[in-house]
Amino acid sequence: MPNTDRHDCIIRGTVVSCGPDVAPQAGTDALDVFTDGALHIAGGVIRNVGPATTVFAQAGSDHPPVHDFRGRLVVPGFIDIHTHCPQTNIIASYGEALLAWLHRYAFPAEERFADPEVAEETAQFFMDELLRNGTTSALIMGTVHAHSADAILRAARARGMRVAAGKLMMDRNCPEPLRDTAASGVTQSRELLRRWHGAGRLTYAISPRFAPTSSEEQLTGAGQLALECPEAYVQTHLAENTAEVAWVGELFPWAEDYLAVYEYFGLVRPGAVFAHCIHMTPAARQRLADHGGATAFAPSANLFLGSGLMDYPTQAALGVTTGLGTDIGAGTSFSLLRTAATAYQIGALYGLPLSAAHLLYLTTRGGAKALGLEDCIGHFAPGMEADVVILDPEASPLASRRTAVTTPEETLFALFTLGDERHIAATYVAGQPVTAHRSTHG
Ligand code: GUN
Ligand code: ZN
């Protein structure tokens, strides 16, 4: 078949992606590695993946243009399953733990989103920053303002990205300008859901900020909305900080624990993503797994706010679906490479150093699983959407030196330890390059 789409291409390089359910210390057998490999992309999806010789032979003589990244790693686009667009402007703000940090930094930043132009400009910057860091999909929190979700989803649509976002629901325990009501929170969320859910690559996320900032009436409404639309995501925070957990105990004295609040209101189900999950018993983690909820592990934010260390061994042993979240602006980087480096360090503190295969899983396929998108994004196979990142080990002198003579697995591990946005040579969204190429052959 002649190539008719100007964006069809064959990407050549060391192609690496994950199989299903990669264990914390899995080795290369959990990865599909083609050292001289290729991805044939047609119409925004992967047509073929494998050794370069096979992919070229099957593409025939009139194959589309080749983007030659030999010497670089070709991996699936990264998936950030918990972050806050409106907090871009307060990343790296000094000195507070969660509850004080919300009042001193996060809420004032979110109040500025009352101005639709601020929301618009920040969303554009935020989306470009994701792409610069190799993140092609994300689950994103807006502010209480309905137009925040519009701005985020419009910016994602303009870039062709697979993104989910939602307006926050908050009707108490926050500054007055950031409050909706139990009724308006649900009505606005429903309108947004109807407008955006399933529009191209976009999805809506029902987004009660966390239990303390929603009344029981509002949580009831959020649960009803979740019931109305079982395919919508639910995103919120859970058990991040000990003072927060104690406060939830005071606000919901009838609940057995923090998770039980969300369970009671019907918010724990497949497609529900709970950020942090630090201060939880193994039994509560088991309930989360049993109900199909997922955890967004946000190690950089957890350290930055001094919130604690998520018990990764227990989380993994119980099989709780887990992806990574940068959690901007409590998190300190947009880069999932850097976030994975911190995940590794927390694993190491628990005596469970995470392998390169698992770190790749957390940044790609694990996130896809948490979002119920394992059949669309997160690994390479024919028919999958072609979100692709090119990792360049030679983009910094140190990584270049460290990876001079290594296996692809060692190179991957070195990039998860030393890497940052300098090492993102290119990002492709649905087969289209969206950042400048630095290929070996121009
Ligand atoms: N818990 C409730 N809101 C937030 C937030 O904005 N960031 C973090 N890290 N935790 C929260
Ligand atoms: Zn968060």
Image: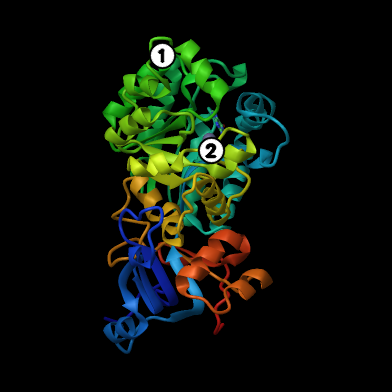
Of the 4 image quadrants, the one containing the N terminus is bottom left
Query: Where does residue 60 sit, x and y in percent of width and height?
Result: 29, 86
Label 2 and label 1: CA atoms lie apart by 29 Å
Residue 216, quarter of picture:
top left
**Residue 392 vertical placement versus 103 (above, below):** below
Residue situated furthest bottom in the rendering: 61
Q: Quadrant of the C terminus?
A: bottom right
Q: Nearer the viewer, mark 2 or mark 1?
A: 2
How packed mark 1 is, by other alpha carbons closer than 10 Å (few <14, some 14-19, many 20 or more), is some
The amino acid at mark 2 is: Leu
Which residue in the structure is indicated by mark 1? 216
Residue 168 to residue 58: above or below: above
> Viewer-proximal residue, 274 or 440?
274
- Neighbour tally class for label 2: few under 14, some 14-19, many 20 plus, Cα within 10 Å: many
Q: Residue furthest right?
A: 94
Res. 180 in view: no
Q: Nearer the viewer, residue 394 or 67?
A: 394
At numbered mark 1, what does the secondary structure look like: helix, strand or loop? helix
Which residue is pictured at 27% across the width and 28% down the height?
228
- Residue 440 drawn above or below residue 243: below
Q: Is residue 317 left or right of residue 242?
A: left
Left or right: where does residue 194 sit relative to residue 337?
left
Q: Residue 392, image x and y in percent?
A: 56, 71
User: Residue 359: percent from the left, percent from the top?
Assistant: 46, 56
In this view, the residue in front, 260 or 222, is 260
User: Type of residue at label 1?
Assistant: Glu
Residue extending farthest to the front is 351
Q: State the SS at label 2.
A: loop
**Quarter assignment of residue 396:** bottom right
How many labels sit on residues?
2
Q: Position of residue 12 (x, y in %)?
A: 43, 78
Residue 309, numbered label: 2
